Amino acid sequence: MNTDPRPDDDWNLEDAADAADTGDVEELDIATAKRGMGPVATALVTVAVALLVVAGAGFGWWMWQNHWRQVSITVDGDQLHARADTTVAQFLKDHDSFQRKPGRLVSLKGDVLEPAGGNAVQVKLDGTTIPVSEYGSTTLARATTMTVTPGTDRTEEHTVEQRTVPFTTDINLNNGPIQVVTQQGEDGTDEIWIGKRSKQEIKKRTVEPMKKLTVQSFSPQPEGKKVIALTFDDGPSQYTGPILDILKKKKVKATFFDLGEEALARPALEQRMVKEGHQVASHSVSHPYLPNMSAQELRKEITTSFADLKEASGTVTRTLRAPYGAFGVQQWKDAATVLDRNVLWTIDTLDWKRPGAKAIHDEVMKNAYNGAIALMHDGGGDRTQDIQALPGIIDDLKKQGYSFVTIDELCEMGGVPKAAQGED
């Protein structure tokens, strides 16, 4: 009876040893193993081996096609070869970019900042431009013609500013006694580029064009006419009434360049001038020397005088005769927006010296011409000699065929352009 608790079919190392000793174990080999496999297992092994062969062949073909295969690249007429996986970047590196150089980095004014800091060499494959950013990803997978050109220069980066351009002047006061502002000055705006590296500045474009302050002078001589303008300064005064009486009697018009403070003191005379067809214009408020004034003071003097004349006479004027005729380039720069004209003279009677009525008369007569402007005074001192001389001046000029005009009329008849008024 078997008293061993293990089952009869258990097999352990001791049993194996016993069996070996007694020769109970069969000897196995590969052939025996094959004979022991069924037909399905054999088929599976065969298929697996075949698949491995096909996969290996496919992988080899893919590697050949995409990596190992040599392709022909034509550059500058020379035929070169490269593996199919060679990128444009690598091909250029291998051949030193075919001696083409990158462009330069230049300043806004064209100075060289970096000899090789510009754009990379340019590449075309069969005529198609390859972006520089794709040199590292574009492969030479087929025979092709490569065109390599040098890189172009690149301009440094810049910032942009809008910059004010102060207006300039074109002031010509030498062509006649009537000075007119024909174009108001206006600041312009330029677009300025500033190089980030060089700090160079260039004007790129004009955003708003600058306009010159333009003052021209004229000496009007109306064609086919014979006219003269009588003008009186420094009034009104006690002598203005008698002068107006003479002008009225002789049916003659004149221009009165009056002081603002005197006009306010004698508004009735101002109003009479206007009523009887004379022109009223400014001779400042109080007869100062205008070049001694600041721009602000000058503008105030002129605008106040215009306001005084309007208050006294009801007349709006922007015509000035500067005291002493002193109104130069700087005064025009300072005050061009507040007046239209500055009127000088061509005949100076020197009546302020009181040379005598005959001398005043003769000075006018010997210098009279078509378009002449005669300077006399109705204020600022004793003007008895002017009153005495005036009738003879008018009569003798009429005998010579002259007619009498105001400054406005002379400008219109002589083709003097209208003033370009400012905003003030």
Image (cartoon, grey):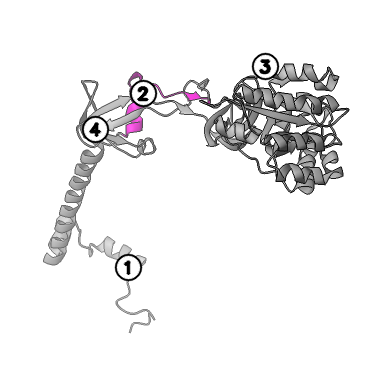
Residue 374 percent coordinates (x, y): 70, 24
Question: Disc 3 marks which amino acid?
Answer: Asn
Q: What is the C-alpha distance between the residues marked 3 and 1?
A: 160 Å
Q: Which residues are magenta?
A: 87-108
Q: Nearer the viewer, residue 9 or 102?
A: 102
Q: Quadrant of the N terminus?
A: bottom left
**What secondary structure is found at the residue carrying circle 2?**
loop
- Answer yes or no: is residue 58 visible: yes
**What secondary structure is found at the residue carrying circle 3?**
helix
Residue 384 percent coordinates (x, y): 85, 27
Q: Give the labeled residue for mark 4.
A: 127
Q: What is the C-alpha distance between the residues marked 4 and 2?
A: 16 Å
Give the total of numbered labels.
4
Q: Give the labeled residue for mark 3.
A: 367
Q: What is the C-alpha distance between the residues marked 4 and 3?
A: 85 Å
Residue 45 got which mark?
none
Q: Nearer the viewer, residue 39 or 252?
A: 252
- Check whether the beta carbons of the residues at disc 3 and disc 1 lie within 8 A of each other: no
Q: What is the C-alpha distance between the residues marked 1 and 4?
A: 85 Å
Q: Is residue 217 magenta?
A: no
Crowding at label 3, few (<14), some or many (≥20) Cα neighbours within 10 Å? some
Question: Disc 1 marks which amino acid?
Answer: Asp
User: Residue 7: which quarter of the image?
Assistant: bottom left
